[in-house]
Amino acid sequence: MKIIVLVKEVPDTYGQRKLDLETGIADRAASEAVLDEIGERALEVALAYADSHDGTEVVVMSMAPESATATIRKGLAMGAASAVHITDPGLAAADLGLTARTLAAAIRRTGFDLVIAGNLSTDGSGGVMAAMLAELLGVPNATALSSVEIAEGSVAGAREVEGGTMRVTAELPAVVSITEALPDARYPNFKGIMAAKKKPFETLSAADLGIDPQDLSTAVSIMTAIAEKPPRTAGVKIVDEGDGGTRIAEFLIENRLV
Amino acid sequence: MTDRPADPILVLLETTPNGELATSTAGLLGAASRIGTPVALVVVAPGRAQALAEQSAAAGAEKVLVVETDATQAELTTPQVDALAAAAGAVGPDAVLIPNSIHGRDIAGRFAARTGAPIAVDAVGVSRDDEGIVAHHSVYGGAYDVDSAATFGPLVVTVRQGAVDARAEARPVVVEALEVSPSGAASAAIESFEAVTEASSRPELRGATRVVSGGRGLGSAEQFALVDELADALGAAVGASRAAVDAGYIPANHQVGQTGVSVSPQLYVALGISGAIQHRAGMQTAKNIVAVNKDPDAPIFEVADFGVVGDVFTVVPQLISALAERKR
Ligand SMILES: Cc1cc2nc3c(=O)[nH]c(=O)nc-3n(C[C@H](O)[C@H](O)[C@H](O)COP(=O)(O)OP(=O)(O)OC[C@H]3O[C@@H](n4cnc5c(N)ncnc54)[C@H](O)[C@@H]3O)c2cc1C
Ligand SMILES: Nc1ncnc2c1ncn2[C@@H]1O[C@H](COP(=O)(O)O)[C@@H](O)[C@H]1O
């Protein structure tokens, strides 16, 4: 079984994240870049299956700037067998459509039984990538899984959707996405970090995949305006001296909030 | 389609598990009515179309396209995508609006990929300028406002639930049954669905005007009841931090923040929540923020309009009685 895990490099959410007001693209210098936590959990799902099923090959794949190599390598250190890094200056401001077309081409090229993505990234928060890829690859999508059961030939799981819990199953090949209800990922250990240095790391350009990022005949979504909102400022802070609750009630009444 | 409007906006309406229109309906049709003529699409179980068409018209749909099928009970995503593709073919919309729910995002993603239309996700509003439809987004936890548009052709927009206040006027019911030929696209099978009926009359978190949230500081699932109590006293929805969800105090659909729900209420009350940046990302656009935390250095105080350094178990009961006192 060959499992491709889609991971993304994102600005660390623990830091102050900035957008470039000229280009609207994430200001990579403003905060540290990390492997998105949800991508790590997706990788954990694949690695946990591989641990107990010989003959499972786990590939981490990412479309990211050249500088993301170290971040992607973390996936290898955690235990993935190989990495595919799609990087191309032309893809710098790729919209969701171009990202999906590029990833789909790379997934096809690599070959797969199962693709595991995160349900939502912390920067794009698009939450549409798994479904787009499933459509482009002509396979089923099972998204937002809060539990995953991988079997020979199928994948199943539960999804917490509006109004209830749904159980779904799909024949492989398929694309799934997972939620943060799934366990935290393992940490790379020293052995893993050393081993990662010798693992296959493929770097692909858009042209390698037959993708022309500048193709004007395809409609794309573009950013037309961007504005920074002034940060929120602190108001009144009191220390409770036995009247904290009453003081909140007064605040609510004064501000016509009750 | 006969008498096609000049500026159609195709709106995919979502239905609830028990076959009603989802609460996102009014906002979606309201948003559509500001940028064109709302044409609704409902994909429902046989026998439900007329009732839902009437409700859609009451919420502002100029015309309601209906597809009656059982397939949505058995197959994930693709029946709705097939219907949407057929509707888009018939209507030729300037934009397609879809709720930014789990189902909605799947449908939007597949539809955009199938038709090659650009997609704008998690919009908090839409408008129209000389060049066409513009989607408005609030990103990085509300720190930036960003607009996006298609270079040409229709834009697919997923609209954040509860973010649009605009409402459309009721219109006469115009229903049209839509012919859909299944694409045969591979899809996952739905094995079962278990509805959770939240046994409460509390407002829904998304789009709520008041929210009371609790964090790890509540200490246990039993003690989390204090959050519910204050919420009821204020007529508020109940939210939570991820730590409270992880600790099992409350189900995940109550999580506010980066990877939870984004809320923009008139009043947000944070109880026993430290105010990690990922939590603030989902609530800092609230008009008024009140926080109670026993740690004077908790970051939640950096965004609170009124902060009390104190123990939630003494401050909140006093607040609840003060509110009850006032009601008398
Ligand atoms: C990728 C990513 C996404 C994330 N997404 C989210 C998200 O969507 N939402 C979210 O909330 N978090 C999210 N987090 C987690 C976030 O970083 C914090 O861990 C989390 O918000 C902490 O929750 P908390 O404030 O309840 O817990 P803590 O940080 O443990 O804070 C508990 C607070 O309660 C106070 N307290 C304790 N007892 C009392 C008492 N008796 N009275 C008053 N105060 C008391 C303490 O002083 C403390 O400040 C995310 C993290 C990552 C990495
Ligand atoms: N550039 C990318 N490279 C690899 N995977 C991606 C990329 N963008 C999105 N994904 C995958 O899609 C998921 C959802 O991302 P998003 O659509 O940005 O919310 C992520 O968790 C990844 O698994």
Image: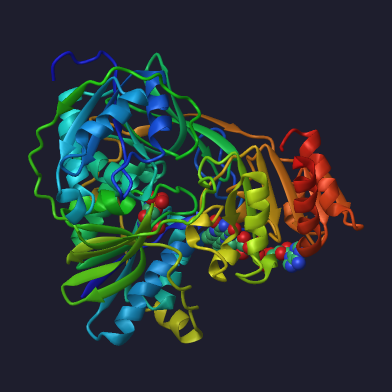
Total labels drawn: 0
Compared to residue A29, the image places residue B28 above or below, namely above
Percent coordinates x, y for residue A48 in the rendering:
36, 80
B93 lies above or below B108: above
Residue A150, given in percent of the width and then of the height, sits at: 26, 74
Quadrant of the image containing the N terminus of chain B: top left
Q: Is residue B303 visible?
A: no
**Going 62% across and 57% down the picture, which residue do you hit?**
B228
**Residue A72, image x, y percentages:** 42, 65
Is A104 or B42 nearer to us in this picture?
Answer: B42
Q: Quadrant of ligand 1?
A: bottom right
Q: Is residue B86 left or right of residue B120?
A: left
In this picture, is B123 found above or below A37?
above
Is residue A149 in view from this perspective? Answer: yes
Q: Closer to the camera, A150 or B250?
A: B250
Determine whether, in the image, residue B171 is placed left or right of residue B122: left
Reply above or below: B201 against B40: below
Quadrant of the image occupied by residue B292: bottom right
Colour pattern of the rendering: rainbow
Horizontally, is A72 left or right of B68 in the view?
right
Q: Residue at x 79, y 41 (%)?
A: B326
Split into 4 quadrants, where in the image is the C terminus of chain B? top right
The extreme front residue here reads B328
**Residue B304 spot, x, y in % from top left:** 75, 46
Q: Nearer the viewer, residue B163 or B148?
A: B163
